[in-house]
Amino acid sequence: MDVIIVPLINVLIIAIDLYMKLVFIAVIISWLIGFGILNTSNRIVYAVCNFFRSITEPLFRKIDSVIPPIGQISISPIILILGCYLIRDILVRVLLRM
């Protein structure tokens, strides 16, 4: 049974790490757009922004529906990253018990 579960948990940990990095990049891109550094009328920039938005925005919206933004600042990326760390830590602890 450990032959199947251990690699599966390792894949989940890698996926969570990758998703946390994607969330971080999406936040940086949104800041760069907000400050006018990136121009979304460029097709390549638009495609990259659309990719990151499509990956992260569904979970951001779900978190924002529970915890609304504070003023103009959404804290959903912070909560999402903390949740990912929590799930990742639980998986690591389960993996160490095996």
Image (cartoon, rainbow, N blue to C red):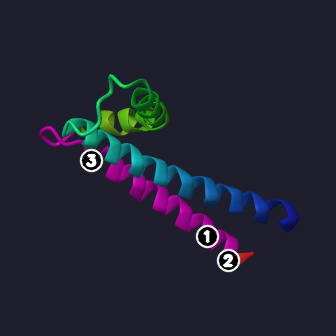
The amino acid beneath tag 2 is: Leu
Q: Is residue 35 visible?
A: yes
Height in image: 36 above or below 11?
above
Query: Whole-percent x and y of residue 31?
Result: 26, 43
| Circle 1 residue | 92
Find disc 3 in the rendering and name its residue.
Answer: 75
In the image, 1 versus 18, the foreground residue is: 18
28 versus 51 height, above or below = below
Between 93 and 23, the residue placed more toward the observer is 23
Which circle's residue, 1 or 3, is located before the other in the chain? 3
Q: Is residue 98 left or right of residue 2?
A: left
What residue is pinned by disc 2? 96
Which three-letter amino acid code belongs to the residue tagged 1? Val
Direction left: furthest residue:
71
Q: From mark 2 to mark 3, how far is it between C-alphas?
A: 32 Å
The dot on residue 67 is none
Q: Are marks 1 and 2 in contact (CB under 8 Å)?
A: yes
Of the 4 image quadrants, the one containing the N terminus is bottom right
In the structure shown, which secondary structural element does the residue marked by tag 1 occupy? Answer: helix
Callout 3: SS: loop
- Which residue is more in the foreground, 63 or 11? 11
Q: Position of residue 11 (x, y in %)?
A: 70, 57
